[in-house]
Amino acid sequence: MDCSNIQYSLQKSKIDYQQLQILFNQAAFWARERTIEDLETAVFNSNPVVTVWDGTTMIGFCRGTSDGVYRATIWDVVIHKEYQGLGLGRKLVETALSHPLMSQVERVYLMTTYQQKFYQKIGFQENKSTTMVLQNAYEINPISLGNGSMIPDSKALDTVPV
């Protein structure tokens, strides 16, 4: 396969959410049926976000979250099936890891079901000590913002009264 047209982008504004939804449905059993609205929210709240393009076709995606110092997480790594095995996924993850919000943290986490060997080649190690997950089934009482809203506007996140 000719990979001379392949480009990586960190520009969230370039993301075509319909293409992203199709990519997840085609190549990610764990992300099928995600709505465009939910994908937009996830991308908005993530940094870095890396996309891979063959011309105008999105063929890869991953996103990260980080505090910039202690912890970061890589999420939603996906490469179109026709492009797997060409080293594009490795470069995708390495591009995210080289971002300033990820490159200096003490620890970078990721969750994977079947791709441990792929991530081990990049340098990730199995971690049996981090074993807790909240499935959002537990009744959590949200913090009221005093205006009837329970979900803070992103601009007011640092001034929520408790």
Image (cartoon, rainbow, N blue to C red):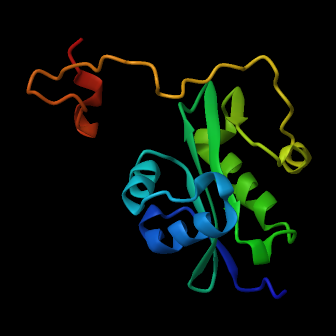
The outermost residue toward the left is: 147
User: Where is residue 70 shown, x and y percent of the image?
Assistant: 62, 24
User: Where is residue 62 shown, x and y percent of the image?
Assistant: 62, 55
The picture quadrant where one finds residue 52 is bottom right
Query: In what quadrant of the picture does the C terminus appear?
Result: top left
User: Is residue 7 at all visible to an observer of this figure?
Assistant: yes
Query: In what quadrant of the picture does the N terminus appear?
Result: bottom right
Answer with left or right where residue 131 lies relative to residue 15: right
Answer with left or right where residue 144 lies relative to residue 110: left
Q: Residue at x 63, y 37 (%)?
A: 73
Q: Residue at x 46, y 25 (%)?
A: 137
Residue 155, relative to residue 4: is it above or below? above
Q: Residue at x 55, y 50 (%)?
A: 48
The picture quadrant where one finds residue 65 is top right
Q: Residue at x 66, y 31 (%)?
A: 105
User: Where is residue 80 shown, x and y percent of the image?
Assistant: 70, 71
User: Where is residue 101 shown, x and y percent of the image?
Assistant: 58, 40
Answer with left or right where residue 97 lies relative to residue 41: right
